[in-house]
Structure formats: structure tokens, C-alpha cells
Amino acid sequence: MAKKPFYLIGIDEVGRPNGRASPYQYIIGIDEAGRAARYGQPRPNFIIGIDEAGRGPLAGPVVVAGVLIATRGKRHVARQLYGIRDSKKLSAKKREEWFRKLTSNSKIEWAVAKVWPKVIDRINITNATNLGVRRVYKKLKLNKVASRLGSKNKNFIVRACPVRNSISNGACREHTLLDGGLKLPSHISFESIIKGDEKIPIISAASIIAKVIRDRLMIRLHKKYPKYRFDIHKGYGTKLHRKLLKKFGRSEIHRKSFRFS
């Protein structure tokens, strides 16, 4: 009998299914039974969620964000993530509220990577996005953040991970959940989940961070390139943006490999 995938949608606050939806169910992307060992796999100590913003725009970088939480003491995080939604389904105001909530939470570690148009044009958007995924994962590697997570709150009793691959160390085992077609190298424990930003709260959290940071960046770039009105469309291929492109041509932050006509 084939082994059941052991990271599907989430667990409740006590690590076992309760047969009904609760504020603590589907919080971080561990299997619904909360017992990965039953499938012949050790349960991770940490869960990472990764998503991107800006894959499709005609201008600006693709921004990848990652969120890491410990599977111990997750009740507080469950409460914090309850009600979170995919960034695309939130207003700008709500995204900013969630961003402040997520980035100020001492039990959440997060990181961001930006891949700019020159790289996108050279290696294509898919490879550029996955480059961002690898950079974010590297920033969140447990040998760099576990001790800091432990120092932020006494409930996080974790040992600093060795420099070697953290997955091979029982105290530092992690599993990464990616949205859609995002990928990591095969030696890393990860799973790509279709519409993960809608299904998995920790991926939703990453999507919000990526979206807010990218939107803020495009607003700053508007000051440098005011005639393109990046403050309005954030680089996406709207009618206004295409009209301005036809009038002024591409700027240095436009993606030359993307067609706009």
C-alpha cells in the first residue's frame, strides 16, 4: 500500500483531528492526523511556507517570501493566523494589517528575496522565481535562525542546528510547503501545493508578506520613474501601463523578455 502524503493541509492545536473545523485546524500545513511518524516519516520541528508576488508583471522584480514557525507551542501562532487569506483576496489595507501582525510576531521568522528584471530576462521567469525560493530557504535555514527563535521566546526550546544539512539532524528537521509550481532542490524536504496560498495558512502568510513588500517597492520606484505610474498598477500589464509603454518605451526596470503589445 502506498504511503499517504504526510503533509496535506493542517492540524488542530492538540495535533489530532477533531472531526470539525476549529480556529486551530489547518494552521501550518502538517498532516490532518498530526502524526507523520505513522507514515514512516519523522515529524518536523519546523514548517516553512513560501510564496511569490510579481511573477506576471511587465516591470519590477519578482519577490519571494518565506515564513518559518516551530511545530512546538503552535497554539499562539494558530490564533494569530486564524482567518488569514490569500493576499490576492485581501484589500491593500487588510494586507498591510496582516503584514504588521505577521512581522511583529516573535514566534514567526520570515525572509524575502528579490529577483530583478535583468536576471528574469537572462534565465526566464520560472527559473528566476525558483532562484528566489532557494534564496529565501537559505535565509531561513535552521542553522541560522533556530537559536534566534529560541531566544525570542522561552517556549521555543530548540538547539542551534549544525552547519550541515539541517534535515539530517533530528533537532532541526523541517518541511517546506510551496505554492503552486515553485520548487526546491530534490535533497530538501518540500511539497508544492496547487493553490497552496488559498489552502495553507502559512503559505497565505508568505504571500501577504511578498505582496506588501513588492507593492511598497513599486511605489518607491514610481518616484524614480513617475511617468510609468507604478504607484497605480505596480508593474502589471493594465491598459494604463500598456498605453504608457507605447508612449515612452521600456525603462531599465521593465522585463525585456515580456511582450506588452
Image (spheres, grey):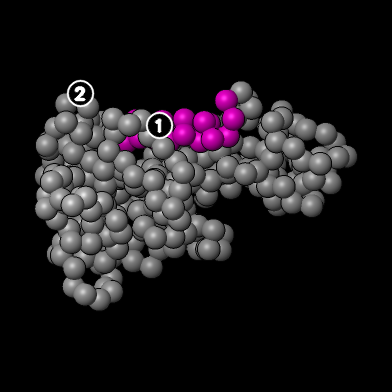
Q: Residue furthest bottom?
A: 20
**Label 2 vs 1, first from the N-terminus:** 1
Please state if 160 lies on the left or on the right of 188 as rendered: left
Q: Is residue 223 magenta?
A: no
Q: Which residue was labeled with disc 2?
A: 164
Q: Is residue 134 visible?
A: yes
Q: Which mark is residue 134?
A: 1
Residue 68, horizontal then vertical, whole percent:
30, 45
Circle 1 sits in a helix, a strand or a loop, which is it? helix
Q: Amino acid at mark 1?
A: Arg
Q: Amino acid at mark 2?
A: Arg
Q: Is residue 142 above or below residue 39?
A: above
Q: Nearer the viewer, residue 108 or 168?
A: 168
Circle 2 sits in a helix, a strand or a loop, which is it? loop
Give the distance between the C-alpha atoms of the residues marked 2 and 1, in whole angstroms: 16 Å
Contact check, label 2 and label 1, Cβ < 8 Å:
no
The magenta region covers 123-140
Q: Is residue 130 magenta?
A: yes
Residue 247, horizontal then vertical, whole percent:
88, 39
Please state if 95 lies on the left or on the right of 193 as rendered: right
Q: Name the residue at 30% across, 49% down.
A: 108
Q: Name the residue at 20% across, 23% down.
A: 164
Q: Which mark is residue 41?
A: none
Q: Is residue 24 above or below residue 226?
A: below
For residue 93, which quarter of the picture?
bottom right
Residue 189, horizontal then vertical, whole percent:
27, 38
Secondary structure, magenta segment, majority class: helix
Q: Nearer the viewer, residue 210 or 27?
A: 27
Q: Is residue 154 visible?
A: no
Quarter that holds the C terminus:
top right
Residue 109, horizontal then vertical, whole percent:
31, 44
Report crowding for label 2: few under 14, some 14 to 19, many 20 or more residues within 10 A (C-alpha).
Answer: few
